[in-house]
Amino acid sequence: MRVVLAEDSLLLREGLVRLLGEAGADVVDAVGDGDTLVRSVQEHRPDVAIVDVRMPPTFTDEGLRAALAARAAVPGTGVLVLSQYVEESYAGDLLADGAGGVGYLLKDRVSALADLSDALERVASGGTVLDPEVVAQLFARRRRDPLQTLTAREREVLALMAEGRTNVAIARLLVVTQGAVEKHISSILTKLDLPPSDDDHRRVLAVLAWLRAEH
């Protein structure tokens, strides 16, 4: 898998290059600012662009804006955002086009090679990967909460769906059968007025769009 990395901290950038290599990724370029990221994605056309949200010159949202620009320039490029903090508005911007192939992870969670490799694979294949803490805060920020119609188990299933987990993975994590998971998901979609879909990625994006919507 070909990756372009954007991280302004030289030490962290070099550390991530080594970590990504150990996770099986081929880092074709590692840059330190958003403008260079856009040019690099256009030149190298990687499977995934990995980017920090806060980059020079203002250290606000340059990295995210650059990732979105790169994705617009080279459609289909996966984007995996690494952030020091949970920033819900940035997660929402990343998910806004509904195209999939996006991820948002906290930096302190990427040290596990298996987790990082799994996240890269899912983003590269068009899936959605969200840090559990991001999911939790998306739930918490709902002003009107249709989640109140869900059972405790359905809430657990929905949170795992929002993380991009497959039915098989959800069943394993909750120690239930896959059939039970499918029934929970059907009930969730019905209660939230979301049409059932056989496409896991579209289903996750539909749930995330509902979580972010203002009513």
Image (cartoon, helix red, strand yellow):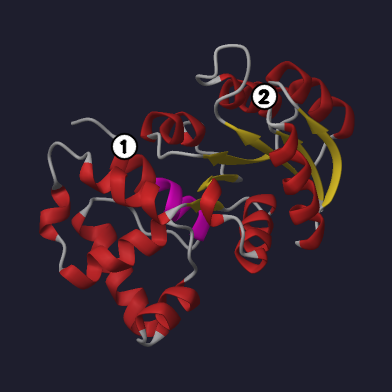
Q: Amino acid at mark 1?
A: Arg
| Side of 170 where 43 appears, left or right | right
**Mark linked to residue 115:** none
- How crowded is the residue under tag 1: few (<14 C-alpha within 10 Å), some, or many (20+)? some
Instruction: Name the image quarter holding residue 47.
Output: top right
* Residue 20, image x, y percentages: 76, 53
Q: Separation of disc 1 and disc 2 at Cα?
A: 22 Å
Mark 2 neighbour density, 10 Å: few (under 14) some (14–19) many (20 or more): few
**On the image, numbered disc 1 is attached to which residue?**
212
Q: Is residue 153 left or right of residue 82?
A: left
**Secondary structure found at label 1:** helix
Residue 193 is situated, as x and y percent measured from the top left of the image, at: 24, 50
**Image quadrant where one finds the C terminus:** top left
Q: Nearer the viewer, residue 136 or 9?
A: 9
Specify the segment rendered in magenta: 200-206
The residue lying toward the viewer, choosing from 100 and 49, is 49
- The residue singled out by tag 2 in the image is 72
Residue positioned 22% across, 45% down in the render: 140
